[in-house]
Image (cartoon, rainbow, N blue to C red):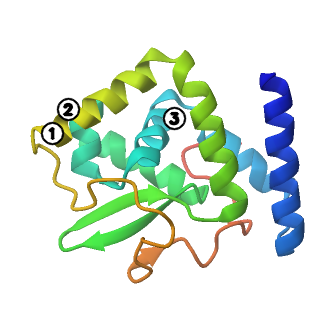
Amino acid sequence: MTRHCCLVGWYIWQHICYKMGVLFPLKQLTYLFKALSDPTRLRIVNLLDAQSLCVRDLQEVLGLSQPLVSRHLAILRAANLVRTQRQGARVCYSLSRAPFLNYPLRKFLSEIVPFFPELQADVQNLQELKGNSVLKSEGSSRLSDSERPAAGLRNDANEGEDSGPVPGVAH
């Protein structure tokens, strides 16, 4: 059943790309998988699926240092998996809105999270910290694509383009 769902998701993804006239080069796909090949980056992407977060929030939830979180976010940005939005002095991160990338990524996350207690624990920790008002991000919950503000966002103009090698990931 799971294999069938994955195949259906893949066909939908191909159909969306075809209808939009978007080519997703194989090289870009390898950058995407290389960026997701690290457990910390998977944890970050899973949290950003729940809501937009700034580096400080990710530090609190994951228990990692600021330079380490920033380095992983830079790799995810280079792979066009996340985008940024400035909120005053803070920069908040959210998942990319590219339709040919967003749907398969969220579908993938929804299917793997139940099998990985670490990912479930991160989301639970996020909810607890949010309930205790420890988090600094103003975006406290997931926004639909139509609700997200367009101003101040980065990485939307070149999503899906071959942006070259992902820094920090062996090629």
Q: Position of residue 98 (x, y in %)?
A: 64, 65
Sequence order check, earlier mark of 3 and 1: 3
Which residue is painted at 53% across and 26% down in the image?
113
Find out whether the residues at labels 2 and 3 contact each other: C-beta distance under 8 Å: no
The answer, for residue 57, to whether it is visible in the render is: yes
Position of 5 relative to 1 (above/below) = below
> For residue 131, which numbered disc appears in the image?
1
Q: Position of residue 156 (x, y in %)?
A: 56, 74
Label 1 crowd (10 A; few <14 / some 14-19 / many >=20): few
Which residue is painted at 58% across and 34% down in the image?
110
Which of the 4 image quadrants contains residue 169? top right
Mark 3: secondary structure: helix
Residue topped by disc 2: 128
> For residue 42, which numbered disc appears in the image?
3
Q: Quadrant of the N terminus?
A: top right
Q: Label 2 amino acid?
A: Glu
Which residue is painted at 51% across and 18% down in the image?
116
Instruction: State the CA–CA distance, disc 2 to disc 1.
Output: 5 Å
Q: Position of residue 114 (x, y in %)?
A: 53, 21
